[in-house]
Image: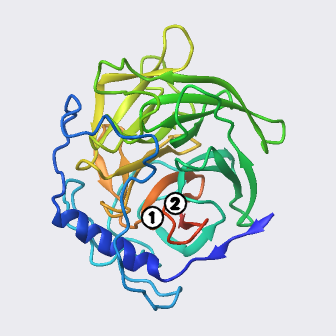
């Protein structure tokens, strides 16, 4: 097993510089899904980056330094908080919310912000059991993954075999009620893996399967990356109800959660584009996660352009901003029975490492 390694200073400076550069070039604010308008559907499969890192001055601050996060703007607000680092004191930004979960969203503390896991470009995570998560790497890494023990903060290397027929840009992971692990590529193609009896290895048992017709704005060619809706997250409901969504896909390009329903042939899931949840401006979403126990609250992750925000989606589909932010360039989010875990993709700044933030919450 491998222990977490401390991250290094340039991360915060790089993320801040990247946000400024991106918005100076023009931040997208429309939440409507165009029919691929303004979306590059001819992206080469060799293009493994969502964004390019700006040159940033080296941040020499201590790894233990944190700054207040008091910005709780509406999700449509594209202004950034004064600092991307999370506060380490409980938040009071969401008052008197009777959310009915095992922990309160207004009694949380962000810790371990500067820790990292030995995995390049973390992009998706799935909860295997109450203490272990499967975390997969971004495109260009061919399904490299780790099993992260959240109790001991150690990792075990593993991989997700990808087979043929689609690219390796696995952007979201989620465990279905039957225990199998599903993954989505940015182009909208699903794969499914069967865990071994010890959940330490995984066999590819299905896919790739498109979540929509390639003639629609909800999927594109299997070998492309960051095209069409540019899916960044997948979350399957732990106890789906007949007639309701079985889960959601987080579309970065459209800033929406797209409803997933079971296919009529039983071969997986497909998008029901009549049921969408507007969450944030275009280009900000990076993941979603359901709480593993009732009432199965739904949380959504934002990337560096948000920057690294977290939202809670209420039962009436009201989107509530969370006061604490996730890991640097947050790409995956996991809800547990005691809070949230956030995983970031800093695209080589840490070498083969990805930053992690743990958010502990009280009842």
297 relative position to 94: left or right: right
Q: Which residue is mark 1?
A: 326
Residue that appears at 61% across and 27% down: 164
Asked which quadrant contains residue 175, the reply is: top right
Residue 178, disc: none
Q: Which residue is mark 2?
A: 342
* Colour setting: rainbow
254 relative position to 222: left or right: left
Relative depth, front residue between 262 and 54: 54
The answer to whether the residues at label 2 and label 1 have Cβ atoms under 8 Å apart is yes
Residue that appears at 31% across and 53% down: 284
Relative depth, front residue between 129 and 270: 270
The Cα atoms of the two marked residues, 2 and 1, are separated by 5 Å
Residue that appears at 46% across and 45% down: 46
Q: Is residue 231 above or below residue 166?
A: below
Q: Is residue 315 above or below residue 336?
A: above
- Badge 1 element: loop
Label 2 vs 1, first from the N-terminus = 1
Estimate the x, y position of residue 238 in percent, counting from the top left. Answer: 57, 34
158 relative position to 350: left or right: right
Residue extending furthest toward the right: 197
Q: Is residue 79 above or below residue 169?
A: below
Residue that appears at 58% across and 69% down: 351
Residue 131 appears in the picture as rendered: no
- Badge 2 element: strand
Estimate the x, y position of residue 75 in percent, counting from the top left. Answer: 24, 54
Q: Residues within 10 Å of mark 2 (few under 14, many from 20)?
A: many
Q: Is residue 277 above or below residue 329?
A: above
Estimate the x, y position of residue 249 in percent, counting from the top left. Answer: 42, 35
Estimate the x, y position of residue 240 in percent, counting from the top left. Answer: 52, 26
């Amino acid at each position: 097993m491998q222990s977490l390694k401390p991250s290094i200073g340039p991360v915060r400076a790089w993320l801040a510089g990247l946000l400024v550069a991106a918005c100076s070039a023009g931040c997208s604010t429309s939440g409507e899904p165009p029919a691929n308008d303004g979306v590059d559907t001819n992206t080469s499969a060799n293009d493994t980056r969502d964004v390019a890192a700006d040159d940033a001055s080296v941040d020499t601050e201590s790894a233990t330094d944190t700054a207040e996060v008091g910005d709780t703007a509406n999700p449509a607000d594209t202004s950034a908080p004064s600092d991307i680092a999370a506060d380490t004191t409980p938040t009071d930004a969401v008052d008197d919310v009777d959310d009915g979960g095992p922990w309160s969203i207004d009694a949380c503390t962000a810790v371990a912000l500067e820790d990292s896991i030995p995995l390049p470009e973390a992009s998706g995570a799935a909860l295997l059991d109450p203490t272990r998560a499967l975390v997969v790497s971004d495109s260009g890494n061919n399904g490299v993954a780790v099993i992260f023990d959240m109790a001991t903060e150690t990792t075990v290397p593993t991989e997700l075999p990808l087979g043929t027929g689609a690219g390796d840009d696995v952007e979201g992971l989620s465990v279905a009620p039957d225990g199998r692990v599903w993954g989505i590529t940015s182009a909208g193609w699903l794969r499914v893996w069967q865990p071994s009896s010890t959940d330490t290895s995984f066999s590819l048992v299905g896919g790739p399967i498109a979540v929509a017709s390639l003639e629609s704005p909800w999927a594109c060619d299997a070998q492309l990356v960051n095209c069409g809706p540019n899916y960044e997250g997948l979350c399957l409901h732990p106890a789906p109800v007949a007639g309701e969504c079985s889960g959601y896909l987080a579309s970065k390009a459209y800033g929406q959660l797209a409803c997933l329903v079971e296919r009529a042939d039983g071969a997986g899931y497909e998008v029901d584009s009549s049921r969408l949840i507007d969450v944030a401006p275009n280009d900000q979403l990076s993941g979603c996660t359901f709480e593993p126990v009732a009432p199965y609250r739904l949380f959504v992750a934002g990337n560096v352009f948000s920057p690294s925000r977290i939202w809670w989606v209420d039962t009436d589909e009201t989107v509530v901003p969370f006061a604490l932010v996730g890991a640097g360039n947050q790409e995956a989010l996991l809800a547990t029975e005691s809070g949230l875990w956030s995983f970031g993709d800093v695209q080589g700044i840490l070498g083969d490492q990805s930053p992690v933030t743990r958010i502990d919450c009280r009842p």
